[in-house]
Image (cartoon, rainbow, N blue to C red):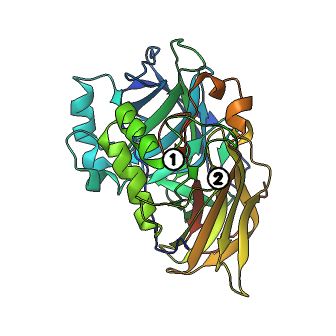
Amino acid sequence: MRSRPITLLLAAVAICCSSLVAPVASASTGPKVTRLVLGNSSAYQPKAQPGTTDDYHCTLLDPHVRHDSFITSSQFKPGSLEDHHAALFLVPPTIAAAARRHHQINTGWTCFGEAALPGTTLAQFLKNPFLSEWAPGHGADRLPQGTGIRLPKGSLVIIQVHYNLLVGHRPVRNTLVLDTVPANSDLEPLTINLALAPPDIPCPEGVTGPLCSEPAALANLGVRFGPDAVMQATGIERLCGEDPANPPISTTARCITKASRTGWIVRTQAHMHLLGTGFSMVLDPGTPQAKTVLSVPHYSFDDQRAYNLARPIHVVKGQPLEIICTYDPNLSTRLPLLRKTSPHLVTWGDGSTDEMCIGLAWVAPSLPRTRHRS
């Protein structure tokens, strides 16, 4: 059983932008909303790494925040079908100067896996707040009423975009829209926790090939994305109590994490790649007190979204939280994109033909005064 705690953060990084600031009409009783529209000054041409069909590129956007604020909504607008998914992070004022210095000599860089901002250590970078994750089907990321994510004065925003070059090779220009309100608004500040589980999905039944074993699949992962990708995949195995040399080969990935803070879960989301078919997140699994936080029995990569909970769920630091992802390896023989690749055992990895199992939970320290129903 996968039982050891795991709380990992997927990182990102950097280039800059043009920005537009516009007021947004709001209810007379609510705080003034300012809309920030951020975009790259030029299109980016995705470039696959040797032996891969994927590119992870990081961009730094400057929202020119002059006052402490809260983000109440974010929306990543993909510029082309090559956009496989995107993650948004905050660069706090303490390291914003280093980010700007780097931007003067660089226009963004490749950032597979966990990528530290140049000039900072990975440990420093992983302390940065995670804002949201976009994937196909995900529209505006409107946070529950009465909540927001802190956006301190002088902060920058970083976007990590995964480009899938199996789709095409067009230049892409993406846009980010943020709705913000003043920090003196009476909002509960949200933090986002990520829980991960390691997939080890067999080749479809009756299908064989040189990459249908775990050692061969990991070796191929290393060829495509380097030794750090293999370390990440095997590290997740260890943190979930598995032996990386002999993990359970299964169409299900699961792991029990422990809540890192006490508060109220008000929003959740699941993320997998193209083989994903189902997802669940459960508090106190296997006990009479077990409570389902999120259930997506018919997961679709093309229809991913976050869910604001109608009834926030109280969570206590250290409380067990399990995520379970289910996959269908036969989709690799049915989906046109996946038929372009050789049969392979599927592990955790950054590529479109690899897999992930991620559960996200937005936690408020206190119960919000008002609730937004999804």
- Compared with 355, 351 (above or below) is above
Query: Tag 1's secondary structure?
Result: strand
Query: Going from the N terminus, do you reach mark 2 or mark 1 first?
Result: 2
Q: Mark 1 — residue?
A: 347
Residue 99 rendering spot, x and y as whole percentages: 27, 37
Looking at the image, which is closer to me, 301 or 338? 338
Left or right? Give the position of 374 relative to 140.
Answer: right
Looking at the image, which is closer to me, 360 or 266? 360
Looking at the image, which is closer to me, 95 or 83? 83
Note whether residue 143 is visible: no
Left or right? Give the position of 274 relative to 334.
Answer: left
* Amino acid type indicated by mark 2: Ala
Query: What residue appears at the point 69 percent right and 86 percent down from the top-left corner?
Result: 287
- Compared with 114, 332 (above or below) is above
- Compared with 348, 172 (above or below) is above
Residue 112 rendering spot, x and y as whole percentages: 39, 37
Rendered image: mark on residue 270: 2
Q: CA distance from mark 2 to mark 1?
A: 17 Å
